[in-house]
Amino acid sequence: MNAPLPTAVQPPVQAADLAALPLIEKWISFASVSRDSNLPIIEWTQNWLEALGIECTRTYDDSGQKANLWATLPAENGETKIGGLVLSGHTDVVPVDGQPWVTDPFVAQIIGDRLYGRGVTDMKSYGATALMMVPELLKRKLKRPVHLAFSYDEEVGCIGVRRMIADMVKSGYQPAGCIVGEPTGMQVVVAHKGKHAYKTSVRGFEAHSSLTPQGVNAVEIACEFVANLKSMHRQLAKDGPFDPIYDVPHTTIHTGVIHGGTALNIIPRDCDVTWEIRHHHLNSPEDLFTQAKAFADSLLPAMRVVAADTNITHHLNSVLPGFATEADSDIAKLCFACAGTDSSSACSREGGKVSFGTEAALFHQAGVPTIVCGPGHIAQAHQPNEWVELAQLAWCERFMRRLADHICVN
Ligand SMILES: [Zn+2]
């Protein structure tokens, strides 16, 4: 995030002030580490919602041991598909193995003005607070439908939510906005960068190092390729395009690993380079890759004069999409209105932009304008003794209640 988050001035929050606390405690009690099944927390949550008359749908992984849960609260006029909001969060948490926990990570515990437990920040508190609101939303009646979207396997690459979103599209749901409750300190986050990771492999031609004209040195070719990536990076840093809200306001290109050669007296045959493009919405990673590949292709003719089967190949290892929602979009304006605190707004009106990836990008890709806004800070995520300030939980409840004022009939 660009600037430190302003802290709302609030009286100290007590456990008794937090209506969602029992549900947060319940969710924390499920040790839903990504490597294990998340069915117990899904089962419990589905039962809880169905007892209130809410219809739920699951989408499973291939093993059947993990599931997403999609639940729809219909609008007053019976509408379930068109318009409305998605409140989205993941049910999985990262492991606690080897971490020096002082408390039982799967028993939520208040110490001072903080709540401790695995997932209190990332990100069960938001999901549980959304659940807490369900009876109130039903009572006050909704102008448009509200969907709860609880996913599996977010922590291992936003795996689960892809199936839920595919099912959402296939079933004809067209929500008008989505709020992903990853920890942003209740700041309204409107964008994060995307990342494309590549491996480029140079196949050269081996020869004795005294006979350099008879070999094709894969390490040296790879270094030329890396040097070109670096000059592309320098140009982005110098000429942009820039999005000043990010800490690093331009798209970056970076080489992380280079591996090649076997001995000093052998002209190396192989060299692999692992590199990435981390882009904001003003750059196309595909275009930048095309530019890098064109440079690599320009090296081939000279290589093939020496040995015909030399080559430079590229493999796209992974893609994490980015997203950017306009700060004056309806969903952003709604979130600013709900997240602001009393007369002195604690929220920047242009919205924050963060460097960590979230499921927001996948909702955005599916055409749903999306915001990230949730209690706690990413610095406490994945840590031993993960905690969240009670004040953040109270802020999240306040956010949800203001949201209800906007989306409910009564
Ligand atoms: Zn998370």
Image (cartoon, rainbow, N blue to C red):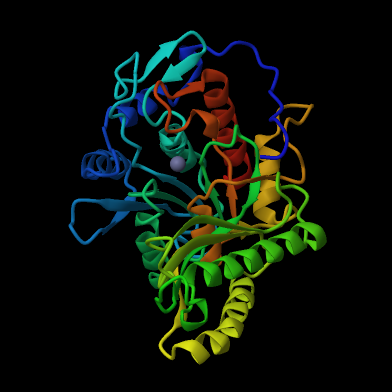
Residue most toward the right?
239
At a point 47% along the width and 83% down the height, the residue shown is 214
Q: Could one spot residue 282 in this view of the protein?
A: no
Whole-percent x and y of residue 390?
52, 19
- Nearer to us in this view, 284 or 222: 222
Count of numbered circles in the view: 0
Pick the front one: 258 or 398? 258
In the drawing, does residue 17 fall left or right of residue 405? left
Q: Position of residue 238 (x, y in %)?
A: 81, 59
Q: Residue at x 34, y 18 (%)?
A: 101
Q: Quadrant of the C terminus?
A: top right
Decide: is 390 above or below 359: above
| Residue at x 70%, y 48% (from the top left corner) | 248
Closest to the observer, 309 or 231: 309
Residue at 49% across, 67% down: 219
Task: Identify which residue, 25 or 261, lies in the foreground.
Answer: 261
Q: Outermost residue toward the front? A: 210
> Residue 278: x and y, percent?
60, 58
- Find ligand 1 in the image and state its quadrant: top left
Residue 212 drawn at (x, y percent): 50, 76
The reply to whether residue 36 is in sight is: yes
Apparent side of residue 207 relative to residue 68 in the rendered image (left or right): right
Q: Is residue 101 left or right of residue 126?
A: left
